[in-house]
Image (cartoon, rainbow, N blue to C red):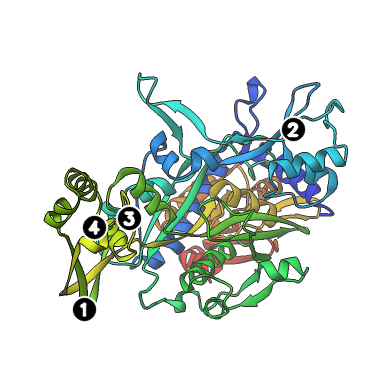
C-alpha cells in the first residue's frame, strides 16, 4: 500500500461491501460524523469491548469495577465540571458562502503546522497574515470564535430543565463515586470503569470513524491517595514496553524513548507511578489489537483539557501518519472538588492512620463582655459578624491580627491549647483516566491489519477481535458434504467457537470473502472427508492448508487460534 489514502480507500470499499460500516441515513444523503456499524463490524466491535474488559477490568478485578450511568446529563453537572464553559473548539466562518470550519484544522491543512491549542486571537492572526481563504469559494474568512461541542436538550416538558448528551462517561462516575466507594470495600485505590455512548457536536467530522459525533467510549477513572504507599502489580505489565515522547523531547525534535512501565514510573516523566502502570495496561490492550507501532506523546499545557494536570496521547503510526487511539490523563482532584463546591456534598473519603496521632489544637474564644464593654452597640455588631464566620475564618483573623470594623480581634480573643487524638483524616482522591473510543480502535485495527495478497484484500486481524473464529465450507453443493459440514458447525459451536458457514459459490470466492472480513481459519469438508473423516484447515494469512481428523479438530483449533 503506497499511501495512507490508498489504504483508507481500500478499507472503506471493503467496509461497504462486507457490512463493516457505512454512513448513517445514507438514503437521505447521510450526516457527517454519524456512521452505522454493520453486522460484521458489530462482531468485531463487541470483541474489542470484550478485550478491553478482559485487560482493564478482569485482569485488575482487585482494583477495578464497572458501572453504568445515564447518557443524558443535567446542565448543573457539566457546568460544575467545566464542560459548559470550556468544552469548545475554534471555528471560523466564510463571509461569502457562510460555511463554518474548524479553524485549527484549516490552518494545519493549509500551512502544514501544528495549530492544536492555539488561542482564537492567534488563529485569527495566522489566518489573516497567511491570507488563508475559504477552501470552497475562496471567500474571506471572519474572526475565529469558539463553538461548544455539547449536544443540548430539554429533560422532560419543562423548558428550564436543560440537559446535555454526555461528552464523556467520566462525570457519571464522579457523581456516583461515593456510592460505589461505600458499597464496595471503602478503600483506595479504586478504579471505576464505564463503557457507553457519548456525543460531541464536532465542527468538521472527518477520517471516517476517527472523528465522530456519536460514538462509544471505554473509560476508567482510577481513584487513589497521593500519600499512600504504592503497591502496584507491575507483574501484569512486565512483558510490555512503551515508547514515550515527553514535552522536552518533542520540542527538541527527538524520537521516543523506550521504557518498561516500572522504569517509566521512576524516570520523573510522569506525575505518579500509577500513571505509568495504566499506560502499560493501555499499551498491552493496543498490542492485543494487533497494533505494534505506537508511542505515548505528552501534550503541552495549551493542548490539554481544562481538567488535566498531565496528558499523554497514545499515538499509532499508520504508514507514516500518527493518529491518536487513546488519551491517558492525570485529572488530579479537579472533578470531585468541583462537584463538592457546586453541591456542598461531601465526596471525600476517610483515610485511617496506622496508629492514632495526637495533635495540638487551638481553641479560640471571643471575650464578648470585653468587646461590649469597650465598644457598646458597635461591639455587639462585631460579635454578630464574628458569629457568621467559620472556625477557620475566625482563626485566620485572630492569628493574623486582622481588624473587623477597625478593631483588632486578637486583642479580645482567648486562645486555649488542647490535645486531641485523631484516628485519620478526610482526603479528596486524585484520578488517572485512560480513555479509548471503541469505533476509533475498530477503525485503526482495520487499517493496521489490511493487506493485499495477489490482488486479494485480507484483514489480518488478531483472532481475539476477528468477527468469527473460523469458517466452515462444504467443497461442493452436495447434500452429504453439506450435512457433514453442518454437523461440524454444531460441534465447534458447542465448544464456544464463533462460526461462519457458507455453501454458495466457488470455494475460491468463499475463501476470498472470509479473508476479506478477517476470519483466521477456514475448514473445508470435501469428498475425502466422507471416507476418512478428515478435513482441511486453511490459514487466512499464509493460505497454507493442513489435513486434520475431525476427532482432533478442537485441539487443533485451540493450538492454531491461541497457541
In the image, residue 217 lies at what x, y percent?
A: 50, 47
Q: Earlier in the sequence, mark 4 or mark 3?
A: 4
Q: Is the Cβ of the residue at disc 2 closer than 8 Å to that at disc 4?
A: no
Q: Residues within 10 Å of mark 4 (few under 14, many from 20)?
A: few
Q: Sequence order check: which comes first, mark 2 or mark 4?
A: 2
| Quadrant (top left/top right/bottom left/bottom right) for the N terminus | bottom right
Pick the residue in front: 242 or 42: 242
Residue at 26% of width from left, 52% of height from top? 179
Tag 4–tag 3 contact (CB < 8 Å): no
Pick whichever, 412 or 99, lies toward us.
412
Mark nearest the camera among 4 and 1 is 4
Q: Earlier in the sequence, mark 1 or mark 2?
A: 2
Callout 3: SS: strand
Residue 221: x %, y % from top left: 42, 57
Cα–Cα span, label 2 and label 4: 50 Å
In this rendering, which labeled residue sits more in front, label 3 or label 1?
3
Q: Which of the two discs, 2 and 3, sits closer to the camera?
A: 3
**First in sequence: mark 3 or mark 1?**
1
| 5 over 236 or under it: above or below | above
Q: Secondary structure at mark 1?
A: strand
Q: Which residue is mark 3?
A: 403
Dot 2 corresponds to which residue? 143
Q: Residue 523: image x %, image y %?
A: 58, 56
Dot placed on the residue nearer the N-terminal end, 4 or 1: 1
Front tag of 4 and 3: 3
- Say which label, 2 or 3, has the lower sequence index: 2
Q: x, y (%) of residue 59?
A: 41, 67
Residue 78 placement: quadrant: top left
Identify the mark at residue 391; answer none if there is no mark.
Answer: 4
* Mark 4 to mark 3 CA distance (whole Å): 16 Å
Amino acid at each position: 500500500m503506497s499511501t495512507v489514502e490508498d489504504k483508507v480507500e481500500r478499507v472503506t470499499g471493503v467496509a461497504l461491501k462486507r457490512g463493516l460500516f457505512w454512513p448513517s441515513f445514507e438514503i437521505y444523503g447521510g450526516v457527517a460524523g454519524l456512521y452505522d456499524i454493520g453486522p460484521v463490524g458489530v462482531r468485531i466491535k463487541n470483541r474489542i469491548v470484550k478485550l478491553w474488559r478482559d485487560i482493564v477490568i478482569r485482569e485488575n478485578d482487585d482494583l477495578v469495577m464497572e458501572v453504568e450511568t445515564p447518557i443524558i446529563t443535567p446542565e448543573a453537572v457539566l457546568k460544575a465540571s467545566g464542560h459548559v464553559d470550556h468544552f469548545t473548539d475554534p471555528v471560523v466562518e466564510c463571509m461569502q458562502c457562510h460555511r463554518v470550519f474548524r479553524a485549527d484544522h484549516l490552518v494545519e491543512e493549509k500551512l502544514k503546522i501544528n495549530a492544536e491549542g492555539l488561542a482564537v486571537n492567534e488563529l485569527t492572526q495566522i489566518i489573516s497574515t497567511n491570507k488563508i481563504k475559504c477552501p470552497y469559494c475562496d471567500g474571506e474568512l471572519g474572526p475565529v470564535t469558539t463553538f461548544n461541542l455539547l449536544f443540548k436538550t430539554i429533560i422532560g416538558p419543562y423548558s428550564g430543565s436543560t440537559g446535555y448528551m454526555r461528552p464523556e462517561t467520566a462525570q457519571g462516575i464522579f457523581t456516583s463515586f461515593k456510592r460505589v466507594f461505600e458499597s464496595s470495600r471503602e478503600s483506595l485505590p479504586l478504579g471505576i470503569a464505564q463503557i457507553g455512548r457519548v456525543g460531541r457536536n464536532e465542527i468538521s467530522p472527518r477520517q471516517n470513524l476517527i472523528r465522530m459525533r456519536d460514538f462509544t467510549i471505554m473509560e476508567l477513572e482510577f481513584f487513589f491517595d497521593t500519600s499512600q504507599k504504592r503497591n502496584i502489580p507491575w507483574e501484569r505489565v512486565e512483558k510490555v514496553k512503551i515508547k514515550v515522547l515527553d514535552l522536552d523531547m518533542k520540542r527538541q525534535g527527538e524520537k521516543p524513548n523506550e521504557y518498561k512501565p516500572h522504569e517509566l514510573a521512576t524516570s520523573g516523566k510522569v506525575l505518579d507511578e500509577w500513571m505509568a502502570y495504566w499506560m502499560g495496561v493501555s499499551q498491552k490492550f493496543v498490542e492485543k489489537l494487533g497494533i505494534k507501532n505506537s508511542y505515548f506523546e505528552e501534550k503541552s499545557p495549551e493542548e490539554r483539557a481544562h481538567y488535566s494536570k498531565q496528558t499523554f496521547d497514545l499515538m499509532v503510526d499508520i504508514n507514516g501518519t500518527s493518529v491518536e487511539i487513546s488519551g491517558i490523563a492525570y485529572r488530579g482532584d479537579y472533578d470531585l472538588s468541583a462537584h463538592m463546591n457546586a453541591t456542598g456534598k461531601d465526596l471525600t473519603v476517610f483515610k485511617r492512620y496506622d496508629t492514632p496521632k495526637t495533635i495540638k489544637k487551638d481553641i479560640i474564644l471571643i471575650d464578648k463582655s470585653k468587646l461590649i464593654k469597650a465598644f457598646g452597640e458597635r461591639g455587639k455588631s462585631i460579635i454578630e459578624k464574628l458569629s457568621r464566620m467559620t472556625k477557620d475564618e475566625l482563626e485566620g483573623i485572630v492569628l493574623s491580627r486582622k481588624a473587623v470594623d477597625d478593631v483588632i480581634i486578637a486583642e479580645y480573643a482567648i486562645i486555649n491549647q488542647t490535645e486531641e487524638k485523631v484516628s485519620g483524616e478526610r482526603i479528596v482522591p486524585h484520578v488517572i483516566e485512560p480513555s479509548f473510543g471503541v469505533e476509533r480502535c475498530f477503525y485503526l485495527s482495520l487499517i493496521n491489519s489490511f493487506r493485499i495478497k495477489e490482488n486479494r484484500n485480507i484483514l489480518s486481524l488478531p483472532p481475539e477481535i476477528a468477527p468469527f473464529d473460523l469458517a466452515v465450507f462444504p467443497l461442493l453443493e452436495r447434500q452429504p458434504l453439506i450435512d457433514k459440514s453442518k454437523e461440524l458447525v454444531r460441534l465447534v459451536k458447542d465448544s464456544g467457537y464463533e462460526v461462519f458457514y457458507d455453501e454458495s459459490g466457488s470455494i475460491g470466492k468463499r475463501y476470498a470473502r472470509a479473508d476479506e472480513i478477517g476470519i483466521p481459519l477456514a475448514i473445508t469438508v470435501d469428498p475425502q472427508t466422507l471416507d476418512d473423516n478428515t478435513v482441511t484447515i486453511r490459514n487466512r494469512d499464509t493460505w497454507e492448508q493442513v489435513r486434520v481428523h475431525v476427532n482432533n479438530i478442537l485441539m487443533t483449533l485451540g493450538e492454531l487460534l491461541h497457541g
